[in-house]
Image: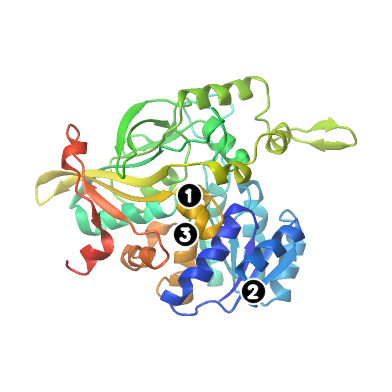
Amino acid sequence: MRLLVIGAGGVGQSVAMLIKKGEKNSGNWLDLLVLADNNHDRAKEVADLAADPRFIPERLDAGDKAAIKALIKKHNITFVLNVVAPSYNETIFDAAYEVGVGYMDCAMTLSHRHPEKPYELTHIKLGDYQFEQHEKWKKKGIMALVGSGVEPGISDVFARYAQKHLFDEIYEVNVRDGDNYVIPGKEVSFGFSIWTTIEECLNPPLIWEKEKGWFTTGCFSEPEEFFFPGGIGRVEVVNVEHEEVALVPRYIDCNRVTFKYGISKEFRTMLKNLEALGMDKADQKIKIGSSEITPRDFLSIVAPSPLETASIMVGKGCAGTWVTGKKDGLFRSVYIYQIADNQECIGKYGTSSVVAQTAVGPVVMLDLIANGIWKQTGVLGPEAFDPDPFVLKMKDYGFPAAIYEKDSEYDEQYQRDSIFTEMFSGK
């Protein structure tokens, strides 16, 4: 595979380091990796960190479709991995199609609110722009694998695994994300991309129900306490807009799909205050000196960078999929998850656990595609593929998955953790 990675930030760096460290367990499937970023020095820094002659830095404006196409042709690229802000997705997605190469992103094309009832009805959903072009991609014989990070991405593979192995009938697929992260000296701070965090947290959350289809609700609605394993414990989670709700119902027969994220009350208050001040805006520009930028871009510049705070953050993050339904006539409730420790990820990859978890999904998927294990054409979500080889390879890249049977009252006492690789080997 000749791979173009657009974006040399935290996720781009994690992708490079995961390939470098994990490829030996999976065969040398990578022929070339072009690291492209608007900041050439940053791209070179990541390439130098990987210390591999196959890793080449390039300067690229992710909003310039002609430049993207020229770079693909210059290096005879066969697959494009997009790890920049979702606002660039349409441009990169279209460029890959026009040249005729594979495409992958970690977050799908952006939604647009209903003009009259934004907290009740959908208008343009996450990924609609991409899925509407499925037949075009299929006819051209190329693949666009969208929503392929950790959430969405790994969480979607877990849902497909549950459908294949653990349930005869599925009631609900509920993605739940929580952590016990602490950043010393920072009561409220961004642990991930500031731009993306504002986008997904302040957009109307998306919910899917078989009887109603897709609909929206109020920000941070339906708070619930969810028990997370690995020493994290109970965390209050709330509805947030996320791609899994747009993806899962396309492939998995169930009654309801939700995504809830553990956001502290203090962080929620900060986000609502930013919205009240207009600092969340991404569709209008303000003039600062001789330059014009959006309020959200300005905030991304002046707020403490997640890359800076990552080095001092301690704790673990858990990403997982909670599935309920029936197996052999009996009710079953299962949480399939992956836990990452921040300081361990800093030591291994030089990036936070949040971005390292995000990067492992696309890296494993690229491995499977390069080795001819995942092969389909069209615009697809991770649920469209066999989950077994993906889950097995997660351990090869240092992020093994686990599972426990949930009990609503006695999670702490009766959780049963089992590494997937042990399950598959029959141990």
Q: Secondary structure at mark 1?
A: helix
Mark closer to the observer (1, 3): 1
Direction right: furthest residue:
290
State which tag comes first along the sequence, 2 or 3. Answer: 2
Residue 375, label in figure: none
Residue drawn at (65%, 46%) of the image: 87
89 or 367, which lies in front? 367
Tell me the residue that label 3 is attached to.
360
Density class for disc 1 (Cα within 10 Å; few <14, some 14-19, many ≥20) is: many
> Could you tell me how far apart the alpha carbons at marks 2 and 3 are, in whole angstroms?
21 Å
The three-letter code of the residue at mark 1 reads: Gln
The three-letter code of the residue at mark 3 reads: Val
Residue 243 in the image, given as x and y percentages of width and height: 47, 45
119 or 392, which lies in front? 392
Q: Secondary structure at mark 2?
A: loop
Density class for disc 2 (Cα within 10 Å; few <14, some 14-19, many ≥20) is: many
> Could you tell me how far apart the alpha carbons at marks 1 and 3 are, in whole angstroms?
17 Å
Asked if residue 203 can be seen in this view, the reply is no
State which tag comes first along the sequence, 1 or 3. Answer: 1
Residue drawn at (63%, 24%) of the image: 274
Residue drawn at (60%, 68%) of the image: 50
The three-letter code of the residue at mark 2 reads: Ile
Q: Secondary structure at mark 3?
A: helix
State the scheme by which the image is colored: rainbow
Whether residue 60 sits left or right of residue 147 in the image: it is: right
344 or 92, which lies in front? 344
Residue 339 in the image, given as x and y percentages of width and height: 37, 49
Residue drawn at (39%, 59%) of the image: 399
Tell me the residue that label 1 is attached to.
343
Q: Are marks 1 and 3 in contact (CB under 8 Å)?
A: no
Residue 241 in the image, given as x and y percentages of width and height: 48, 37
